[in-house]
Amino acid sequence: MTADTHTYPTVLEAPIVACETRILSVPLDPIIITANYRIVTVEMVLLRLRDADGVTGHGCLWCFGLPQATVIASVLQYLAPYAHGAAARDIGRVTADLRREINFFGFKGLSVFGLAAIDMAMHDVLCRRLGVSLATLLGRRTDELPIYWSGLFLNQTTPELVEENQRVMSEGFRAVKFRVGKPSLQEDVERLQAVLAHVEPGTVLMLDAVQEWSPEEAVRGAHRLAEFDPLWLEDPLVHNDYPGLRRVVDGSPIPIATGENEYLREGFLQLLDAGCPYFLADMQRVGGIREWLAVASLAQIHSRVLTPHVYPHVALQLCSALEQAEVWIEHIPWWDDLMTYRIEIADGLVKVPDRPGIGFDFDPEVLDARALGPWQDVSGS
């Protein structure tokens, strides 16, 4: 199935009559410090659409800090009127209109974020009108998927890393992503050894260099860290160094994963040229659900593995319909406390919920507690 050929069932038509945005702030514990960011909170910009029958759906974009969130909200104020008056099943037409509109700005950056939020929210309305999950709409193939914990950051001390790892093992995780990129590669090795001394047998390891290395450092680091048999090494370079990526892919004994900074399906063509075996697609940068599915088709055609970047609640729905043999869900807990339900994990597997919508079931009381202001009308009417 591809996003371009998939057709949605006919449902009772009801135009979208309200488009609203709201900014939330989610505190992090522990905070995250990288080469580019000191992240104390994650801000969520919600888009809520409501049709004439009162069915609502949400899109969600994330960023770091209120200034970024304010800019994203202004993009939705600009683009959301394209959804106003459309029926939820008109996603293809609306996204085509949006592509024409954002052509002036180009097909990267915040304009694609806006397209993604509208795509998500319209899919959510459509699924709720039909009373089905996104997985069911797309053709669910499985009821459970392997999941990995995405934490273990560079700014944490070794005792903190060990404590976090022991906790997630007790919660049922059997795969973890560990950040590398300390000034000393030996320090990375020692920290990793300490964590791996406290994992369950058979635990799968992923490594993430968070764009910290040069191509030469990445190849050297990959050869040193290969002894730990990681499944992949993620983002070894700054994301737009495609010639360097090609050299790393060729020189690394560890498979390379990247792509969370790519926009639309076109961005992943550069990763194909670089020979990258693992694609990471971030739903807000890739342009929403339809475009994420287009990248999935591209990966399948070229025998690459597509894996989602964050958005675990929606990723479960998308990945349960994938036809590829290897599938992983990244779990990062930013959305957990915002939802009315918990993701169920046992022995390294996560159950795919069968509930109407794309995966967003926001708790109204929690939204009110985390909101930095009221809902804002962006219908443009």
Image: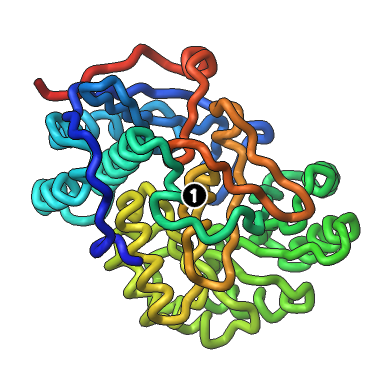
Q: Position of residue 179 (x, y in %)?
A: 66, 57
Name the side, left or right, on which 19 lies relative to 273.
left
Colour convention = rainbow
Q: Residue at x 30, y 34 (%)?
A: 72
Nearer to us in this view, 318 or 188? 318
Q: In this view, does 102 lie to the left or right of 359?
A: left
158 over 206 or under it: above or below: above
Taking 308 as reference, is 102 left or right? left
SS type, badge 1: helix
* Viewer-side residue, 142 vs 21: 142
Answer above or below: position of 1 versus 114. below
Which amino acid type is marked by label 1?
Gln
Give the residue drawn at x 40%, y 66%: 296
Residue 91 visible in this rendered orientation of the protein: yes
**Where in the figure is residue 20, as x and y percent of width and height?**
27, 22
The part of the image, by quadrant, that contains residue 275 is: bottom left
- Mark 1 is surrounded, within 10 Å at the Cα level, by few (under 14), some (14 to 19) or many (20 or more) other residues, namely many
Seen at 43% across and 41% down, the residue is 132
Q: In which quarter of the image is residue 128?
A: top left
Residue 253 at x, y = what percent? 64, 83
Q: Mark 1 points at which residue?
A: 317
Quarter of the image with the N terminus is bottom left
Residue 154 in sight from this viewpoint: no
**Which quadrant: the C terminus?**
top left
Residue that appears at 77% across and 61% down: 187
- The front one of 349 and 87 is 87
Q: Position of residue 43 (x, y in %)?
A: 45, 30
